[in-house]
Image (cartoon, rainbow, N blue to C red):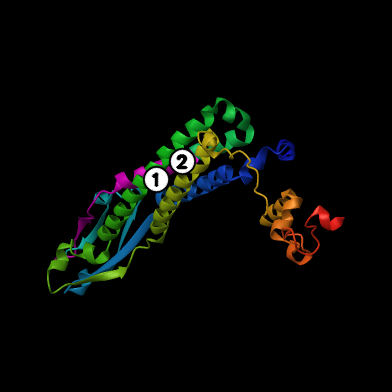
Amino acid sequence: MDVVNQLVAQGQFRILKLPLGFIKVLQWFFSIFAFSTCGSYSGMFKVSVECKNRTYSDLSIEVEFEYPFRLHQVHFNAPNCKDGATEPCFLVGDYSSSAEFFVTIGVFAFLYSTAALSIYVFFFDKYKENNKGPLIDLGVTGVFAFMWLVSAAAWAKGLSDVKTATDPDKVITQIPACDEESNRCGEVHDPVMSGLNTSVAFGFINLVLWVGNLWFVFKETGIIAPFMRAPPPQEKPAAPDAYGQQGAYEQDPYASNQGGYQPDYSQQGYNQEPEYGQQGAPTSFSNQM
């Protein structure tokens, strides 16, 4: 505990608060849920065979099956409705490949998430050194994203086939005694498939998490850094009123009279040319003498 407290004090776990580490924690949890809900499943259903001679009947035949769903190896004993003897009946289908593939991807995803979280927390500086760690992480994350897509889709199809093969109404048709109209066969209890449905849901949730994590791991590689540089700062244009003020200051003060106040020389008599012989203008030197 002292070591953990020291690491927390030093900020070693701060990476878990960032999207890169937080999504990796989610991957760790949901990978456990995915392979555990599928790999630990065991189910059971019941059918009944009521013979014409009821002494030979069996109204509660239990059929159990489990992971990895090699149903062709699952058998049960049903009455033949003839002499009180029973005969073995087998289920149909082998769906172990898709189930085991799904569980295997879940286990390896859990192991890789554990290793990646350990590196993020304790060796993040070395992880960023020479950019090798992010590149390797990006490649592995891409592979797991593709594997989750394939395994989740395959297991979804496999689960659909398992539901069909374990449907009591379909299993009844495989019992020879049920072919006779004098005997009555029916289902007593359906298998509970909620756990397997949840495993498929967890598979596609893992797909979303691993695909989404590609972006955050890609950002750590620094490949996109040159394209995300901020443009050089540009001078902001002056506001319109500033231009107006500046223009007012730069105008020729003597030119303001051109568009502003212009004295009316006509009223003062300055704009009239002197006419000799008229009032106020001397006509000749003789008049002065």
- x and y percent of residue 148 in the render? 39, 45
Q: Could you give the CA–CA distance between mark 2 and mark 1, rounded to whole angstroms?
A: 9 Å
Front-most of 274 and 189?
A: 274
Residue holding disc 2: 109
* Residue under the image location 21 percent in, 56 percent down: 88
- x and y percent of residue 284 in the render? 79, 55
The disc labelled 2 sits on which kind of residue?
Answer: Ala
Residue holding disc 1: 148
Residue farthest to the right? 289
Residue farthest to the top? 130
Front-most of 22 and 197?
A: 22
28 is higher (above) or lower (below) than 188: above
**In the displayed structure, does residue 146 sit left or right of residue 257?**
left
| Element under disc 2 | helix
Q: Tell me, for residue 186, which label it has, or none.
A: none
Dot 2 and dot 1 residues touching (CB under 8 Å): yes
The stretch of residues the image draws in magenta is 82-111
